[in-house]
Amino acid sequence: MNHWIRTALRTLSSDQLRTSDTHLYRLDIPGLRGVDIYLKDESTHPTGSLKHRLARSLFLHAICSGKVRAGTPVVEASSGSTAVSEAYFARLLQLPFTAVMPRHTTRSKIAQVERLGGRCHFVTHAGEVYAEAERLARECSGHYMDQFTYAERATDWRGNNNIAESIFRQMAEEPHPVPRAIVMSAGTGGTSATLGRYIRYLGLDSRLVVVDPEHSVFYDSYRTGNPGLTSQAGGRIEGIGRPRVEASFLPEVIDEMIKVPDAASIATIHWLEHILGRKAGGSTGTNLWGALQLARRMQEAGERGSIVTLMCDGGERYLDTYYNPDWVAAHIGDIAPYRQQLAELG
């Protein structure tokens, strides 16, 4: 093993050791007595999102697979958060980095990639990122990281401080330590694959429920069993949902899927800010809306227990979109009916 590889692996290990585990909040929701809702806050990672874990794993996988060496240009297809996290690790390893992303990506994410020394290359439609990233990597003799293929392969789903192990360790002393359900949205599908595998590996009595936003094909693919579905429509909840079924999306480890209206996702993050005092990204709203639907279902059945979901990133990246009333009215529509439903929970 050469000197650069040893140094790179030590650098990535040092980042993990410096990064403490993320907080697990128990939400105070008066209208859901008997069902405890927990929110794991992944926005506290150094790059501000759940994708920090993924980016570290992808670099480790690429280096140990011989794909990335000293000076290798790295190219990624991303809707924003993965690009930010990969730009961070590329800078640590002194590697050139280019993110291929849709032109409508939030401006703050673009600025973060550029502040970290990365370059942003834009395409018009989300479905164009794959081929363009492959082309750029080929032209510069670089490595296309391809999070959508390698997310579920790069993560050690049996342990090593992955997201699933962290959740169950933090839940150990809670009133209902084994959640009735873990709710997660899918972007690459890698996190849901890790959660589902870990639950089965340990024989835990938890269900994995995956939520999907509008204009994404994951839900319909799961329902019909057709992995070849595609969509031309662009998603409005950044970071989750895809116009094609990604290789890292594993329906076999999922117990249930729920389709979530985009207006419900945005209404939920505004409601969450009221009860938690924190702004969150749109994908958190999708996650939490799904968790609340499951909680209501449990209440109606007279069941008690816990549900865990994730805060994927903070809302500061979306001040000009999800927290801008004019943008929401123009791109999402009327969120008032969903806000009313949420207000009834307290």
Image (cartoon, rainbow, N blue to C red):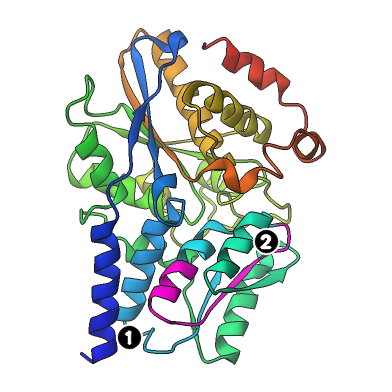
Q: Which mark is residue 175?
A: none
Tell me where residue 280 sits by quadrant. top right
Q: Which mark is residue 126?
A: 2
Range shown magenta: 87-104
Nearest the camera: 258 or 21?
A: 21
Is there any visible trace of residue 8 in the rendered image? yes
Three-letter amino acid code of the residue under disc 2 = Ala
**2 and 1 marks in contact (CB < 8 Å):** no
Nearest the camera: 252 or 36?
A: 36
* C-alpha span from label 2 to label 1: 29 Å
Q: Position of residue 192 (x, y in %)?
A: 39, 47
Q: Position of residue 175 (x, y in %)?
A: 22, 19
Is there any visible trace of residue 230 in the rendered image? no
- Crowding around mark 2 (Cα neighbors within 10 Å: few <14, some 14 to 19, many 20+) is many
Q: Is residue 148 left or right of residue 199?
A: right
- Crowding around mark 1 (Cα neighbors within 10 Å: few <14, some 14 to 19, many 20+) is few
Q: Residue at x 67, y 61 (%)?
A: 126
Identify the mark nearer the N-term, 2 or 1.
1
Q: Residue at x 36, y 65 (%)?
A: 56
Q: Is residue 298 above or below residue 193?
A: above
For disc 1, the marked residue is 66
Q: Residue at x 24, y 90 (%)?
A: 3
Three-letter amino acid code of the residue under disc 1 = Gly
Q: Position of residue 174 (x, y in %)?
A: 22, 24
Q: Is residue 80 left or right of residue 71?
A: right
As helix, strand or loop, the secondary structure at mark 2 comes to: helix
Q: Is residue 140 above or below residue 44?
A: below
Q: Residue at x 38, y 84 (%)?
A: 67
